[in-house]
Amino acid sequence: MKYMIEFKKKTDDENLQNLYRVGSMAAFLIAILLLGEIFVYALIPDQNGATEIFELFRENAFAGLLLFDLLGMISYIFFIPFILSLYMILKKSNCAIMTWGTILFFVGISVFFANNTGFSVLSLSRQYEIATTMEEKNMLISACKTMITLFDVNAFLVSYVIVSVSWTMISYVMIKSKNFSRNAAYAGLFAGLSGIIAEIIENTLNQFLMVAIGFYFLAIVFIIIWIILSGRQLYKLGFNYKY
C-alpha cells in the first residue's frame, strides 16, 4: 500500500511537471502572438464599413482574418495550458478565487470563440464577389454589419472584460504566492485592470477614445510582462522539478 501511494504521488508529480512544461512553452508563444497583434493593428488600417471589409477580404483574406483577431484566437488556445498550470500552483494559496478566476477565463474564451465572426465574414465576402444583383449585395452587406456588431460587442467587449477580470483575480492570488515574483503578480493585475478601464472608457466616453487606446496598449504591455515572468517560473518548475 505504501509503495502504491508513493508511486501515485510520483506519477502525479510527473504529470504536473509535464503540465508546467507545456504551460511555460505556451506562455512564450502567447507573448510572441501578442507582439504580433500590436503590429497587426498598427499596419492594417481599421475598416468600419461592410464594403470596406469585403474589399479587404477580397484583396487579402489572411489580413481580413487578422483584423478579426485571428492571432487572439490562437493565443487563447495557448492560454489554456498556461492558466491550468497557474491554477494547479496557486489553488493552494486561495482555492476559491483561483477556481472562479479559472472558470471566468474559460467562460470568456468560450464567448470569444462563439462570437468571433471572422470566418463568417470571409464566407460572406466570397458570396459578395459573385453576387449579381444589388438586392443580393445589400442583403450580404446587412449580414456583414450584423457579424461586425457581434464581433465588436460579444467577441471583443464582453469576452475581453470577462477574461480581464479572470487575469485580475489570478494575479491577486499570485501576490501572496511564494512561487511567483511580485513583479509578475502586479503586471497581471495592471493588465487586467487596464483592459477593464479601456473597455469602460471606449464604450461610455467616446470623446476619450485615445485614452482608451492608451489603456489598451498598457494592457497588452503588462499582459506580455505577466506571461513572460510567469512562463519563466513555470519553466523552472517544469524542467528543474525536484522530487
Image (tube, rainbow, N blue to C red):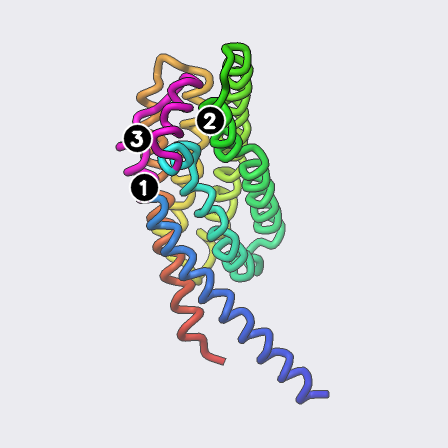
Query: Which secondary structure dominates the residues rendered in magenta?
Result: helix
Location of mark 1 (residue): 221
Secondary structure of the residue carrying tag 2 is helix
- Which amino acid is tagged 3? Ile
Of the numbered discs 2 and 1, the one sitting upstream in the chain is 2
Please state if 225 lies on the left or on the right of 97 as rendered.
Answer: left
The residue located at (33%, 26%) in the rendering is 213
The residue located at (36%, 27%) in the rendering is 56
Give the Cα separation between the discs numbered 1 and 3. Answer: 20 Å
Location of mark 2 (residue): 125
Point out the stretch of residues depicted in magenta: 35-61
Label 1 environment density (alpha carbons within 10 Å; few <14, some 14–19, many ≥20): some
**Residue 149 badge:** none
Please state if 71 lies on the left or on the right of 89 as rendered.
Answer: left
Give the Cα separation between the discs numbered 2 and 1. Answer: 34 Å
The front one of 65 and 131 is 131
Q: Measuring from the top left, give residue 83's x and y in whole percent.
A: 51, 53
Q: Measuring from the top left, give residue 106's x and y in whole percent.
A: 58, 45
- Which amino acid is tagged 1? Val
Location of mark 3 (residue): 44
- Which amino acid is tagged 2? Ser
The residue located at (34%, 24%) in the rendering is 46
Q: Measuring from the top left, give residue 101's x and y in whole percent.
A: 56, 46
